[in-house]
Image (tube, grey):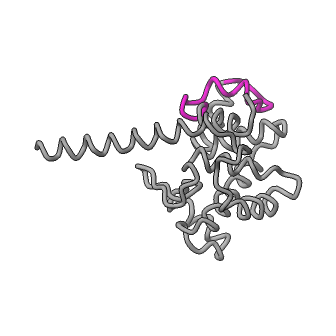
Amino acid sequence: MRLLTILFSAFLVSILSYDMAVSRTFDDHPVHSGKWTDQYDRYFKKYSKRYFGPLFDWHWFKAQAIAESALSHDAESHVGARGLMQIMPATFDEISKKNPHFSKLESPKWNIAAGIYYNRTLYRKFTKTPEQDKLYMTFASYNAGYGRILNASKRAGSEEKIWEEIKPHLPSETRGYVARIRRLMGES
């Protein structure tokens, strides 16, 4: 029993340490600061252009990956999400059915491609939403699930889905997640 308690305590400490370390890095270094590796930038650029068009600022997805994994390609969450974009294996399998060339969840290239593709799938669902708000709703959906965003929208009584109206009805983790990405991009 004592060994089990020690192992469980060590597990909790490792999770909390990781979360605190990642949280500290968000506030310290905006995505444009040069403090983050540019090792994966070509993938963020390529797949942002492919799924969001040439005018879209790919840094948003790099900021999302920083929020998800601190750009750690081998990150794995306590629920099993993996890689830079912290994609669940079941989600990757679904995405791979439509994109058979997305070969490995653990590959930084395909993890980023799948994450941005999934963002595009979510983004397209927000038809009655102003452009910038669509992006925030997309990130919130990526974090909490599309259904939670719909429920929050219903609670807000908002026909046109505006981020500031829906935000108070979302879980604090999701509000914090979107706020981190925005801070990384230099927004307040």
Picture layout, residue 102 above or below residue 89: below
For the residue pair 4 and 145, the one nearer the viewer reads as: 4
> In the image, is residue 161 part of the stretch drawn in magenta?
yes
Q: Could you tell me which residue is drawn at 67 percent across and 71 percent down?
A: 99
Please tell me in which quadrant of the rendered image residue 107 appears.
Answer: bottom right
What span is colored magenta in the figure? Answer: 156-175
Q: Could you tell me which residue is drawn at 64 percent across and 67 percent down?
A: 109
Residue 170 percent location from the top left of the image: 60, 29
For the residue pair 147 and 22, the one nearer the viewer reads as: 22
Picture layout, residue 31 above or below residue 99: above
Farthest right residue?
A: 55
Horizontally, residue 14 falls left or right of residue 131, namely: left
Residue 145 percent location from the top left of the image: 59, 44
The secondary structure that most of the magenta stretch takes on is helix
Q: Could you tell me which residue is drawn at 88 percent across and 53 percent down?
A: 55
Please tell me in which quadrant of the rendered image residue 182 appears.
Answer: top right
Farthest left residue?
A: 1
Q: In what quadrant of the picture does the C terminus appear?
A: top right
Residue 43 percent location from the top left of the image: 71, 64
Q: Could you tell me which residue is drawn at 35 percent across and 44 percent down?
A: 14
Please tell me in which quadrant of the rendered image residue 163 appears.
Answer: top right
So how many labels did they put on this image? 0
Picture layout, residue 12 above or below residue 39: above
Q: In what quadrant of the picture does the N terminus appear?
A: top left
